[in-house]
Image (spheres, grey):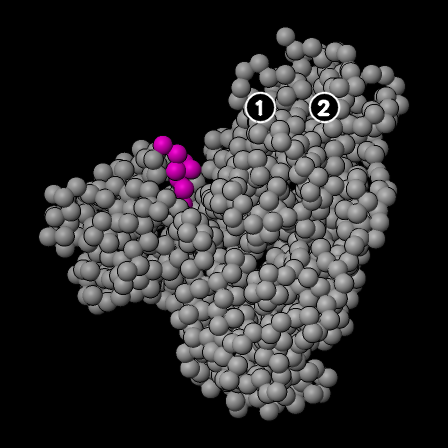
Amino acid sequence: MFQNDIEITPDLISRHGLKPDEYDRILQLIGRKPTLTELGIFSAMWNEHCSYKSSKKWLKTLPTKGDKVIIGPGENAGVIDIGDGDVAIFKMESHNHPSYIEPYQGATTGVGGILRDVFTMGARPIAAMNSLSFGEPDHPKTRHLVAGVVAGVGGYGNSFGVPTVGGEVRFHARYNGNCLVNAFALGIARRDGIFLSEAKGVGLPVVYLGAKTGRDGVGGATMASAEFDDTIEEKRPTVQVGDPFTEKRLLEACLELMKTGAVVAIQDMGAAGLTCSAVEMGAKGNLGIRLDLDRVPQREEDMTPYEMMLSESQERMLMVLEPSKEKEAEAVFRKWELDFAVCGETTDDLRFRIIWQGKEVADLPIKELGDEAPEYDRPWVEPRKAAPLPDDAIPAVNDVGAALVRLMGAPDQASRAWVYEQYDCLVQGNSAQIPGGDAGVVRVEGTGKALAMSADVTPRYCDADPFEGGKQAVAESWRNVTAVGGDPIALTDNLNFGNPEKPEAMGQFVRALQGIADACRALNFPIVSGNVSLYNETNGEGILPSPTIVGVGLLPDVTKMATIAFKADGDEVFLVGGHGSHLGQSVYLRDLHGREEGAPPPVDLALEKKNGDFVRGLIASGRVSTCHDLSDGGLGVALAEMAMAGQRGVRVELGGLDPHVAVFAEDQARYLIAVRPAESAAILADAAKAGVKVERVGTVGGDAVDFGPAGKAPIADIKAAFDGWFPAFMGGKA
Amino acid sequence: MRSAVVLFPGSNRDHDMVKALHSVTGVEPTVVWHQDASLPDVDLIVLPGGFSYGDYLRCGAIAARSPAMLDVAKKAKAGVRVLGVCNGFQILTEAGLLPGALMRNAHLRFVCKEVKLEVTNNDTDFTRAYAKGQVIRCPVAHHDGNYFADPETLARLEGEGRVAFRYAEGTNPNGSINDIAGILNEEGNVLGMMPHPENLIEALHGGLDGRGLFESVATSLAA
């Protein structure tokens, strides 16, 4: 028998992730002891994951406005204007903690959750991406996590029918105890067809839609707001179970329903399920909500109100219904064989009331549940920064060709085909650029325009210097969108950090956010949505600070899109931004010399903007269709990728430069372009006029990336190393 | 050419197929809900790709029992051309309209990539626009495309020229027996195939190799 009025002991409070002073705040707010259900509701609303209590202060400082921003942070996803009355709606969200506990289901429900965030606003998802970080390859859990997470990401997105057009996968020992699974989704809607969660009107029916409620995921958001320790296996029941088939039907049913005029407000049930969605709708609309739990469709018997309010069962929505359309609305859900149950109503008393078996089991002030959540100004210290390396501390190599081959077969540079071939990247028939290039590109159905998107962060830079690393993550995403010809519009972020109660970790967060904000301002690249994942720590060790950025841009004419592949022998290859010299934190130093040292390359944002705008202009004018940005591994890795993609080599001329420095430096704000010889002079003249440094580095042709006397990397050798590592690793051979 | 695309709960390449049919034939196909017991009078019925019923139980097994499929079987018997792609192929085998079965891929993973297809038999209503032995590009995207049939059935398929497409140049992505990618029924009016010709029909897709299949059907109707 469920007992709602039990003694609230300090132990019970602590097991709900609430601190003693937070509990005192509850007592003050409601003027009495909470019931068990109420305590559960508070823990769901006030955990880090839902309340952003440690991060809110800093999130407010991020630039979120711009000409093309229609809706910024605060809704289910951000909305940008892409012209002609069309909008793109997108967001990224983490499912780190559940994926480490149960990789397949954790990843699957991460994808499901982000897709729901997008279609709950009225958009049909047309693209997905992800950013995955795993422990070092030879850690005993890594293969298991990679296999499970990748299968889970694919298992959900493929069945749902959204193309996964890009992403990133990295390995580092600092993720041994906490993997990162960040899932991104983007959808398209009409500007006048955006749906919001704000309830309007008193006495309107609140309707439960989708799948039934079970006991899965009870307390999931609270679990995701704590560090891991050795009892992690016991947390498995807090992970939800995904059903993409139901989500696909929910998508079709919701989009059909939205056309009927029945939807006053709608909110998906994500973290903290029924609690969070109902409170969100009521609080935003200045209305109370009364829920009758006996009318909630249930998958299991004898569920208590506590379990129902905290369940994170997937594929569910809550909406406020226009009563005159009830029959029509219900018919849509019956057609798709989904639940449709009126389970409550909006009220004018600003209370959140829960009725169960005829009794009121919770009665809380709805606004305060969200607005009065604790907000912390966590103490932070300036994080430790790695010292710059003197030039003579960096060893050379005899043969940069052989070094390049080795680098291309290293875990972080090797081909991700083993991963992305498990994702359907073609469904819907609009994919213009699939994984393997600088950005994913998807045409907007029925138009000649397309959206470009790229997920980026370089956590080793962020660890060595959080401020510069934050800048770099934004700059690289902006650069990747630019490199395919996209005009960068806005971004979503997924801020993955360690324990905010530790001043050093909090310092990383603060400084990275300052770097992100600077870059967003300089590049006119506002943040329209995002997610924070803290407490990525196990037994006291935190992850590398990993603020993942997904930038989104528009290509007005998809036929002018650039790709990385070399296209014709004899084309001249130019390095926009000129040669570099920075090897601190480079993959050259790490993968060839076993040293993770030095300061990361600084990001000159003005230069970034100037060079990027120049390259984008060349692509838009139709004069350049081969372009690649420089990032990890610098010039050498970029040339190798262009050669493999085009199945033709390049003869590189380095002049008198130190080969290992010129080939592997990771200086920012740089691109490679290949142009027809007849165009070179004019392009160089334009560059001079724009004040952009452009250097000729070689000519397309042959079957190798040929550095002349400095060494030679045959494409066949590069390809063997590049293609070989991942399958060998997953097969237990690397 | 009039065509119909049957929509099952969980279909997700229905839209791609509708676009491809429209692009090649110039006529918008009719979309038929799986609960409709009778299909309109058309020249070609298509069962599209996707994950009908979430691939639960067995891929295509539940969809094969839907009311619309009874009419598809009836119309197939009467000679109407039926094309099943990916999940559509799985549904056709589960409905008994094509022999054999599609098992889990040999490597047990979902696979989405471009493969090469050999047009093994070009003397069919679905392949006439290609040359015999021609090798075309075509993407695949499936988890259960590993074709299997018992030796007797296999001998008949091969002997009667009912293997329409074969994975070529070592690109068999799933372990299918005899590299089989697509097969016909005895009468030659029902084709099931795992690859997705509907995803290679315009410049944006990077190739037009898939168009030939739809052009073949349109031409054979005109003849």
Image spot of residue A167 (x, y percent) = 56, 55
Image spot of residue A312 (x, y percent) = 61, 30
Pointer 1 residue: A215
How many marks are shown on the rendered structure? 2
Please name whichever residue, A499 or A119, is drawn nearer the observer in this view of the structure: A499
Q: Chain of mark 1?
A: A
Find the distance from the CA under tag 2 to the CA under tag 1.
Answer: 18 Å
* Quarter holding residue A622: bottom right
* Quarter holding residue A121: top right
Kind of residue sitting beneath label 2: Arg
- Asked if residue B74 lies left or right of residue A26, the reply is left
Q: Is residue A365 magenta?
A: no
Say which residue appears at 58% left-offset and 39% top-offset: A100
Considering only order in the chain, which callout, 1 or 2, is on the residue closer to the N terminus? 2
Q: Chain of mark 2?
A: A
Please name whichever residue, A457 or B220, is drawn nearer the observer in this view of the structure: A457
From this view, report whether residue A359 is shown above or below residue B46.
above
Say which residue appears at 56% left-offset and 43% top-offset: A111
Q: Residues within 10 Å of mark 1 (few under 14, many from 20)?
A: many
From this view, report whether residue A83 is shown above or below residue B71.
below
Q: Report the span colored magenta.
A: B50-57
Say which residue appears at 61% left-offset and 57% top-offset: A455
Residue A15 marker = 2
From this view, report whether residue B64 is shown above or below residue A398.
above
Tell me, yes or no, if residue A485 can be seen here.
Answer: no
Query: Quadrant where the N terminus of chain A lies?
Result: top right
- Asked if residue A650 lies left or right of residue A586, the reply is left
Image spot of residue A11 (x, y percent) = 75, 19
